[in-house]
Amino acid sequence: MRKVDPERQQAKRRQIMEAAGDCFARRGFHATTTAEICAAAGMSPGNLFHYFDSKSAIIEAIVDEERRDAADYFATLEDAPDLFEALLGFLDVVMAFAADKAYARLALEIAAEAARNPTVGAMTAASDAETRAAIAALLRRAVARGQVDAQLDPAQAASWIAALIDGVFSRLAIDASFEPEREAPMLRLIVSRFLKPGSAA
Amino acid sequence: MRKVDPERQQAKRRQIMEAAGDCFARRGFHATTTAEICAAAGMSPGNLFHYFDSKSAIIEAIVDEERRDAADYFATLEDAPDLFEALLGFLDVVMAFAADKAYARLALEIAAEAARNPTVGAMTAASDAETRAAIAALLRRAVARGQVDAQLDPAQAASWIAALIDGVFSRLAIDASFEPEREAPMLRLIVSRFLKPGSAA
């Protein structure tokens, strides 16, 4: 029996996920065939199934990687000197992803599949809950430092920041004139006015 | 040839749209059969096709009715004494709809179908553009009266209010703990802080 090299295995999986992500963004998740994914990844169908059982397993792996990437990102903010600016920086990153048409299309494909496929739905919900918890934790620390309005419930405020991010991707689907590059400063403004201590109303 | 009574015709169409909307919300647009819609509407399949050519035609009629309802709603705000409060009242109405589980599920079905079906997609985009234009017009008048920050571009601010509304429906799909009844005051707060003249940041 051939020994499995975990690093090589991981690199191969990532290569497939990237090729599949491109296909899903371009053609839609359901319209994409495993043959197309294999062609894009430059491998034989038999070989693909060594790494993923199904097309659904690939999208699940993409959701899980996004979840881990987000967790890693928030871990780097632990020592940020200005937590408020750290949160706004996160929103800039989200808007940069939204400006990437392939990424935005893949995000919408994942959301659609989450509604149809309970496994993808549960993973997406878990990832979303984890990101909201990370934002809430950041807000809690920012409140303690007087950088965020103490009247706000951090978990609830985090939900609304998540709603704004969801809203950006919905805008991309429905409104061709919505340009993330141009809108990024507006997201900063809305969240700043929402969270700053001493905000009115 | 039997004479068509336009009012009766319209009442019958509305009856079918309501029955179909319930089915779509409960079972999903694609899983719903025309036989189920007929049973729910209490009519024979042959009779249904006098009113709608297809299942898609029914969802198109629902989108069009929503568009007209929204236009009628904004027309009633023309003479509102406090335009700012009128906008917040509109957001309360949106949150009341979001709290209606059947309505929220139907909204998500329509959004999903808009992504798959170009006709539904174009109608949804047109309806969205019309609502954004109505919000922008209201904001423009509110700016003139000093009720909204004159630094904001009304069309851009309207896009972000639309993004927040989209975000509410996305939250309902992904986060079981998001309760519109509880969140309605928060949407008011976010939009107030965003728009009020003299807001910081």
Image (spheres, coloured by chain):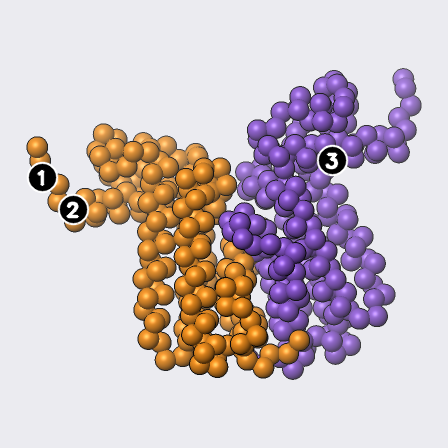
Chain colours: A purple, B orange
Label 1: chain? B
Residue at image position (46%, 66%) is B136
The circle drawn on residue B6 is: 2
Q: Is residue B17 visible?
A: yes
List the residue tagged with mark 3. A18
**What secondary structure is found at the residue carrying circle 2?**
helix
Q: Tell me how far mark 1 sits from mark 2, CA to CA.
A: 9 Å
Q: Amino acid at mark 3?
A: Glu
The image position of residue A121, as x and y in percent, is 60, 43
Dots 1 and 2: beta carbons under 8 Å?
A: no
**Picture layout, residue A18 above or below residue B105:** above
Q: Amino acid at mark 2?
A: Pro
| Quadrant including the C terminus of chain B | bottom right
**Of B91 and B97, which appears nearest the observer?**
B91
**Picture layout, residue B56 above or below residue B139:** above
Q: B109 left or right of A134?
A: left
Asked if marks 2 and 3 fall on the same chain, the answer is no
**What secondary structure is found at the residue carrying circle 1?**
loop
Q: Amino acid at mark 1?
A: Lys
The image position of residue A136, as x and y in percent, is 70, 64
Residue at image position (63%, 73%) is A193
Q: B127 left or right of A53?
A: left
Label 3: chain? A
Q: B29 left or right of B35?
A: right
Q: Quadrant of residue B44?
A: top left
Q: Tell me how far mark 2 sits from mark 3, CA to CA.
A: 56 Å
| Quadrant including the N terminus of chain B | top left
Residue at image position (68%, 35%) is A22
The image position of residue A98, as x and y in percent, is 65, 51
List the residue tagged with mark 1. B3
**Of A31 and A142, which appears nearest the observer?**
A31
**What secondary structure is found at the residue carrying circle 3?**
helix
